[in-house]
Image: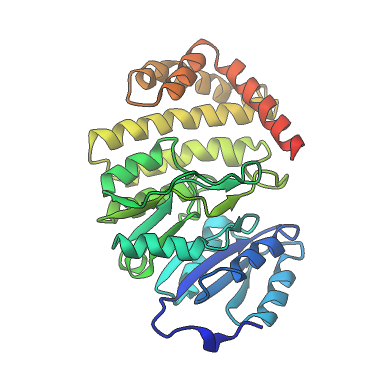
Amino acid sequence: MFDMDNISPSSPLVSIVVPMYKVEDYLPQCLDSILAQTYSNLEVVCVDDGSPDASGRIAEEYAQKDGRIRVVHQQNKGLPAARNAGLELITGDYVTFVDSDDYLAPDFVEYMLHIITSQQAEMAISKNCFTTADLEQVKQDRIYSISSEEAVAEFFLPYMRLGSWNKIYDRSFIEKHHLRNVPQLTTGEGLQFITLAASLAKKIGVGERKVYVYRINNPTSATTSANVEKQGIGSIKTLEYIEKHLPLRSHKEREAFAWHKWASYKYCLHHIVEAHAEEVYPELYAECKRKLRSGAWGVICSGISLREKAVAFVELISPTFFARLQAWKKQRRIQRK
């Protein structure tokens, strides 16, 4: 049992929101990593999103052993709604999100809290993260801050992990702007949340150490299995939603958004090919290839990295070849883990 008397009254309370759905195999490791944090003044809100497995029961067992954990149960409404339910219940000074099939390095909270407080920022990010296939730490760390426009552009470009996780937010900033996830978005909901938050922030803190472990070997994860409707079409709809609701104030932001919108068609095509659903979605299949070819030169001529320019050139020549290659590599990677 955790001793609440050992917490200093001057220490900020950090709330951790953990949405749960079909994660019984991974939840214990996730919660163990949270409870083992070097920073102990935590409030953990586990949201059981109508999970049909033992996730809710496992979380309740942890709550009985540690008073910092609170479990709420709701009908299945999806990941964005589960995160929102957590946001309605937290009382901390800062808030962070942890996906329940991922887990944390022992100093995750301590490190993230140091970034956001030292930089006097409204939100902070760890630029890099571990994966279950790459547990090597970066050789050097650097903590600094970037502007709102820089952060929005960075989030659209392929240099940072795009979820709500691996970040920390000042809760007063979240509540001031009533920032919530959009329930109707089926994928990329984290991108919508972090770009909107960044657009409203005055300063964003950045660190480069890896302190979050992103799982890539969960066969039930939405990002592991091909799903044309939820993932492929969902990614395009998310970018369309962002385009309507997020003001892009600079050329850098607009150029970065254009790349990500182009990439959403690449992502959708990959799901179609991986699911062998070309004949199920013939019009969408043709549209994705058309969008990739028509937008490739714009990407090649933009300020994107040389690697991404090379990807765009391959997409210009043969979008389907690249999609099939990526699907093959993905399966090989999953099978090795």
Between 108 and 201, the one lying in front of the other is 108
| Apparent side of residue 24 relative to residue 268 in the rendered image (left or right) | right
Q: Residue furthest front?
A: 139
Q: Position of residue 26 (x, y in %)?
A: 71, 58
| Figure coloring | rainbow
Q: Quadrant of the N terminus?
A: bottom right
The quadrant holding residue 157 is: top left
* Residue 35 visible at all: yes
Between 178 and 252, the one lying in front of the other is 252
Q: Position of residue 113 (x, y in %)?
A: 41, 65
Q: Is 106 placed above or below 330 here?
A: below
User: What residue sits 49% from the left and 77% below the top?
Assistant: 41
Q: Quadrant of the C terminus?
A: top right
Q: Residue furthest top?
A: 317
User: What residue sits 46% from the left and 54% below the top?
Assistant: 182
Q: Position of residue 193 (x, y in %)?
A: 42, 53
Q: Residue furthest bottom?
A: 5
Q: Is 281 placed above or below 99 here?
A: above
User: What residue sits 33% from the left and 18% below the top?
Assistant: 301
Between 195 and 119, the one lying in front of the other is 119
Q: Is 245 placed above or below 323 here?
A: below
* Residue 180 visible at all: no
Q: Position of residue 126 (x, y in %)?
A: 44, 51
The quadrant holding residue 158 is: top left
User: What residue sits 49% from the left and 20% below the top?
Assistant: 311
Between 263 and 167, the one lying in front of the other is 167
How many numbered discs? Answer: 0
The quadrant holding residue 280 is: top right
